Every structure is written in C-alpha cells, then in structure tokens.
Amino acid sequence: MRIAAIAHFLRRFLLGWLLAMPLLSAPAPAAGIDPALLAPLAGDDTDAKLRAIAALGLLPDPGGAAVLQALGNDQLYATADGRVLIGDGARATDPATGAAVDLPADAGAIGINNRLRRAIEAALAGLRLYSADARERLAAARRLQQAGDPARLPMLEKALAAEKHDEVRAALEIAVANLELKSADPAVRRHAVELLGRTGNPAFRPTLAAIARQSDGPQAEPDAAVREAATHALRQIDRHLATIAWAGNLFYGISLGSVLLLAALGLAITFGLMGVINMAHGELLMIGAYVTYVAQALFRAWLPGWMDWYVLAALPLAFIVTALVGMALERTVIRWLYGRPLETLLATWGISLMLMQGVRTLFGAQNVEVGNPGWMSGGITVLDGLVLTYNRLAIIGFALFVVFLVWALLNHTRLGLFVRAITQNRRMADCVGVPTGRVDMLAFGLGSGIAGLAGVALSQLGNVGPDLGRAYIVDSFMVVVLGGVGQLAGTVIAALGLGGVNKFLEPYAGAVMAKITILALIVLFVQKRPQGLFAPRGRSVE
Amino acid sequence: MKQTALTDLRLLARRPLYSGRAWAALGAGAAALALLPLLNLAFPPGHALHVSAYAVALLGKFMCYAMAALALDLVWGYAGILSLGHGLFFALGGYAHGMYLMRAIGRDGVYQSDLPDFMVFLDWKAYPWYWSFTEHFWYAMLLVVLVPGLLAFVFGYFAFRSRIKGVYFSIITQALTFAAMLLFFRNDTGFGGNNGFTDFKRILGFDITAPGTRAALYWITLAALAGALVLARAVTQSKLGRVLTAVRDSESRLRFIGYDPLGFKLFVWTLSAVLCGVAGALYVPQVGIINPSEMSTETSIEMVIWVATGGRGTLVGPIIGAGAVNGLKTWFTSVLPEFWLYALGLIFVLVTLFLPAGIVGLARRLAARFQETKA
C-alpha cells in the first residue's frame, strides 16, 4: 500500500519534472550561460520563454539570477542577431560569455507580460534557495512556505535534498509539506504527512494533530488512511522528542556527574587514607576557583593576547596553591588528630570557616566574575534542539583526564603504592617501613590539589564566590559515602550515577524534589550497604 | 554472661544524682538566672539594678541553645554518636509550636484572613491536612514531642540496625537535615517557604510581646532546662547510662559480651531528639521567628562546637559552652562582625586540639592541680 503510493508519487514527480524542465539535462557551460538557453527569450513564443525562465531558475550559476532580474526590470535586450544582453545605460554584459560589451543601437528591450512576471518571481525565489548566504536561503524558503503553487514542489524538493543548514532545512520541509498537503491526491497528502512525521520536528505537531482529529470542518481530511498516517506521524514526533529529552538528560547527567566526580575525587583520597572527612574540602574548591580568577586578572593585565589560554595556566597554579594549603593543614592541625575522626571533622570545619572569611576579606563578599575563554563558549548542536556546550564537554574530558591521572598515580608510582598500603592497614604499613607521616602529608596535598583543579573547572560553570564550596560539600560527601573507600571505580560510578539519576529525576520531580529524593535514596542505600558500593574486603573489626 | 556482669557490686551500687555541693551550685545558678526577669520587671530603665529586656530575651534564647546542646551531649558525649542533624530536630519542634502560634494570630495578619499570610499569598483556600487540630495548644505540644521523636526513632532504627557509625552516621544525618532544609524552603511544603513563620501575636491568649509573657516564657525555659539536666543526669547515672558509655568506648566488645546496642542507642537518640525539639519549641515564641535556616549544615555543626567547648560528656559543660560561644558571638557580631567567623573557626580548631574535655575539663584539671599543691 505504502510502496504503491510512493511509486505513484515518484511517477508523478518525475513526470512533472520532465514537463516543467525540458532543458534540465542541458549541461551548463563552465563560463557563462549556454546561449541556447537564452535564445528563446529573444523569440516570440511565450511558452518557450516560460520554459527558458524555469530552466534559468534551476541553474547553479548566479548568472541565471542576473538574467532573470534584468528581464524583470526591463533591462534585458535582444539584438538583431538573436543575442541576449543585460543592459545598463550604454553598456551591456553578455550573460553567455560574461564579457562587457557596448549595447548595440539595434538592441530592443524584451517585453514581458504578467504571466511571465510571475514565472520570473517564482524562479528567482527558487534561485535564492541556492544562494551561498544561509539567511537569504532561509528568507526564500519562508516566502515559499506561503506560496501555494504545487508546481514549485520539485524545485523545493531539490533544494531540500541539497540543503545542509538545519534551520533552512526545517523551513524547506515545512514549505514542501504545506504544498503537498494541499494536493488533491490523498496519496500525496499521505506522503506529506509521513514526511512531516519523519522530520520529528515539533513545529508540525499542531498541523498533524488537526489532520488526525478532524474528519470534517475547515481542514477537512476525508481520507482515513491520511488521518491514520497523521496519527502515526504524531507518535513519531513524540518519540523523537522523547529521544532528544533522553539524550539531553544523559548529557547533563554526565556533565553533573563529572563535576561531582572532580569535587569528590580529592575527598575520596583523603577520606580513604585517613578515615577523615575533610570539611574544608569545599573551601579548597573555592580557593581553586579564586586562583582562576587571579590568573584571569594577571593575564588581562600582562598577557592580553593570550587571554584565551588563562584557564590552562590556572590549572597548575591552582593545583600548587591548594596542595600547599592542604599540606599546611595536614602538618599543623590534622596530624595531631589521627584516630579521632569526629574531632578532625570539627577542626576542619573551623578551618573552612576561616578560609571562607579570609577570602571574603581579600576579595570581598560579592561573587567575582570569571569568564569562559573563547574556545569554551558556544557548543555543538546535535539532534536538533540539543546543544552540547563546549565548557561542559571540556569539563567532562577534564574529569576523565584527572581520573586517569589519579589512577596512574595510585597504581603505578611508589607514592601510590604507599597510599594504598596505608589505606589497607596503617599500622602494618608503618611496621614494614612506610613513612606514614610523609605519605599522609603528600596524599593530603594531592587530594587538596585535585580539589584545586576541580575549582578551576567549577569556575567555568557557575558563580565564583566565598560560598562556592558550601554548595558542593554535601554532594561530594554523598559521592564518597556511596562510592566507598579505597576504590577509584566506586567514586567514579557513584558520581556519574548520582549526576545521571539527578538529571533524570528532575523533569518529573523538579530540581529540589529530585535532590531530596536522591538524598533520601542515599540514606536508604547506606542502610543496605554501610560501606558503600565497593567495600574493601577485610576481616578487621574497626 | 549478662548475669555475671550485673552481679558486680560496684556496678550495682546506686550513685546519687549529684553531690550536695553540686546540687547547691546548680540551685544557685538557676536562682541567679531566675532573678533576671524580676529585675527587668521590678526596676525602671536607668535604675542601677535594671536588666534590659534585650538581655533577658538573649539569655532566654541561650537557654534554648543550651538545652539543644545538652541533648546533643547525651548522644555524642555518652553514646559516641556524633549527630550533624540536631538542627533538624530543633527546627521541627519549633515548627510544630509555630503552627499553633500562626493559627493564634487569627485575623490579625496583613490580609486579615483566617489563613496565615503566606497561604493567602499562595492563594490557598484551606489548611492542608497536616495542619489539622494545630489550633489546639496541647495538640501542638504533642507534635513538638512526637514529630522529632518519631523521625529520630525511625531514622535511628534503620541506621543503628545497619550498624552505621562514626563519620558515616554524621554524614548521613547531615544529608537528612540538608534534604529537610530543601523541603522546607519550598513554598509548596506549606510551612512558609524561606520566610518560615513569624509575626506571632499571642500565645494562649496572652500578648506574646508583653514583658510579663516574656518573663513567663523565660521561667518555663529555665525550668525545662533544669529538668532536662536532671533527667539527662539520671539517664547517664543509671545502668543504662553505663551501657551507653560502653557503646561509646567499644561497641564491638559490648556486642561480643552479649548486649545488643540497638535498643540503648535508639533510646538515647530518640530522647535526645525529643529534648532538642522541646528546646526548639521554647525558642520560637521567644525569638519570634522560625525558618529553614535553622536546618542548615552550619547551625547543626555549631551546636556540636557548643558541646565541645563546654566539655563533651559532662552535661553541665554543654550548657556553659552554649552560653560562652553564643555570648562571644553576640559580642563579636555587634563589635567586630568581620572577625566572628575567624574567631569561631579558631574556637573549633583550638578546642579540638588543646581542650578535648572543654571548659569543664580544664576547670577539673586546674582544680585537681590546686588540690595537689595544697596537699
């Protein structure tokens, strides 16, 4: 049934094509326009003229448009020897060669009637569909949406086949479908409906819904098959929309997950090592973001030409600054509190208060402005309507890079070996000669440095202010608690899982309720697995 | 196993709640505090013995904080459970009482409606179901006890049953409180969104701003605090209290001996939440506002530092700590507001590093040294 309809359509389509464009197959000369195409314009046969105009309208050469425009403005002249020239005062251009010539005295302007004028306008609109300027193509497509002449269908189809620009494509699709919907042939109407369905464009929903619903009324659709096709097309569009929404949730979920991962990775290292939750971790993120701000200011003052790369310079800087702060913390406060995790929690909270107030004193309580570099603004559009912004893509990539770095460090260096040893059994590691004090300091520095790197990434996504760390502190704890200790994989899966679940819940529950649900789910999850997703195996009783 | 442990005579010997001298000191402290509103009422402003209404209100507020700190000390100091979510129980008690106070406003609100202003603003036509009966004072008081108690019981049952402890438990309580704060910030939750409850007019028919009402609220708070202190002392001095201390010091060993810590932990945890809820309920009419910021992470952690500053596991310590830290806060925020967070941060660090037993512990050490030199 459907194949028959398509075959019917194709036959009709080809027939119309051949009738309307008899000269289509004539190859256009490389330079200028084939004189054989122009010759009928100088003649008297109106039908031949119409065919010539239509043929000119299909030329890929902008010369065709020039000829048509001249004809419409009464500036096209025919010489006695049958040549056609575009006149401009005493001078003229030969469209066949592109050469400038003097306008011969015997040349007369080619007159046109209304029938010809309409054909010229249509051909010109069609020609603009091939313009190099996307805006002009869009305007032409929009104009053709309104025109209800089914004869233009083939021209639109051709433009649609060649069009690459999404917006213009959409406009052309509407134009084609609108023309086809007016067809008297139910098979063509059905094809149009099917075409609209295939585009998945939500802009067609109202039209299709009207067709699917009505069997009488202003937009009467007598054919049941077309109505059925419209219903099917509606479902197709809805499915497409659902796919876009799903892909969007996935992308934003991964993006949020990678942010959480960056924020929690350093925490997971220090927590795994010392069993201590560093409450000042959020403030280390904040310091990393402020280092980015300072780097931006320095570049603005000293290296304005390199502004686009200040973020890259901020990365090592933030790592060093926060690692130093972290090591200083470890040496002065935290190491005196080993074995008393709850007290450490309080002491680091106190430190976080001081760091926060310190930043307020230095930079003011207001948020500071950190800009995206040029290469991070904008994004790629996929699946019409879903924009993957470059800054989010960059942060996803960066998070993967940092995870790889930490993995390599933990599994392929001597320090990593020591860290793993202490995580598994601190006293035994000490007994066999691991310098636990120094490893603690270095590992704490590493965890803090990663927080600094995360701070640089966060500065590219949201506001940078003294409270920045507070927004992430509960979330990063959740990641660590969920992921368990001593396994990078746990942290990665927990972060991405939390990000994903959060974004998939948001459309149903709203942002706040999604967050509440997640917190409640984590509380429930921890009941089942108090040691997190990946509990270290062991026989110790705390 | 259990039998032999109980037959140990030293463990069976009943200890008095407090020694005579301690009773006297506590009585003197309570009497001094009780005198303040009288001085405020009896002497006109400007008189040498006049105590400003501001100071009385401030002390009333501190006593509510002290009660919350006392509740926290019960679980942290004796059972070793560090809760970062006591702000939630405090706020829940406050909200439960606040519901009654909101309904007691009657038609005196800005919109002169039977509904509270925020409900008129949201274009609600009737009270949601969970507001039913809150126009009755005694029902609201029941909620003050039941809501925090029930939440703590259910949450504690599952958490303790799964043997969540230490830092994990702290983080989970923090998550719970954070989730509750987000919930209460929503307008749709029906508790006034981020403005919470305020503009109270009267309580049980009395004008809530009248000096007499304020003095009465102050005395009730003082009595509640004293009662809570005695109750907490009774609990910790009992055999149950000794099991709790065992939970704190070595839960696994206790379990190996044959005790199931679940019931003990659950009891003290629920009791603590109820005390905290009562503190919140007393706080609301005196301060005149309750909003979700009471459930913020910061508030709950600050409660912990009151306990740590005063002396963990001493019961009197948290009361002193709450007073000291909040007194300092009041002084800083009026004189050097920029430096308060530095000072608070420093208190956190210094207390954990140098004063693990808090002010009370320091005093005991000094007293012991004094005894030594005298001997």
Image: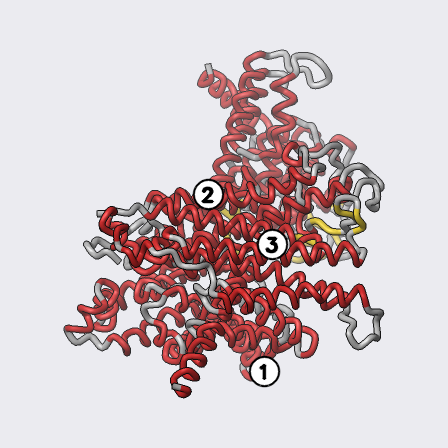
- In percent of the image, x 72 and y 55: which residue is there? B216
In the rendered image, which quarter contains the C terminus of chain A? bottom left
Q: Chain of mark 3?
A: B
Q: Type of residue at label 2?
A: Phe
Instruction: Give the residue type that dot 3 points to.
Output: Ala
Q: Nearer the viewer, residue A50 or B71?
A: B71
Disc 1 target residue: A301
Query: Which label sits on residue B153?
Result: 2
B6 or B265, nearer to the observer = B6
Q: Position of residue A164 (x, y in %)?
A: 52, 45
Up-down relation of residue A200 to residue A223 (above or below)? below
Q: CA distance from mark 1 to mark 3?
A: 63 Å
- Give the image quarter of residue A437: bottom left
For numbered disc 1, what is the local secondary structure?
helix
Q: Which numbered dot is residue A24?
A: none
Whole-angstrom CA distance, mark 3 to mark 2, is 22 Å
Where is residue A396 drawn, in percent x and y? 42, 57
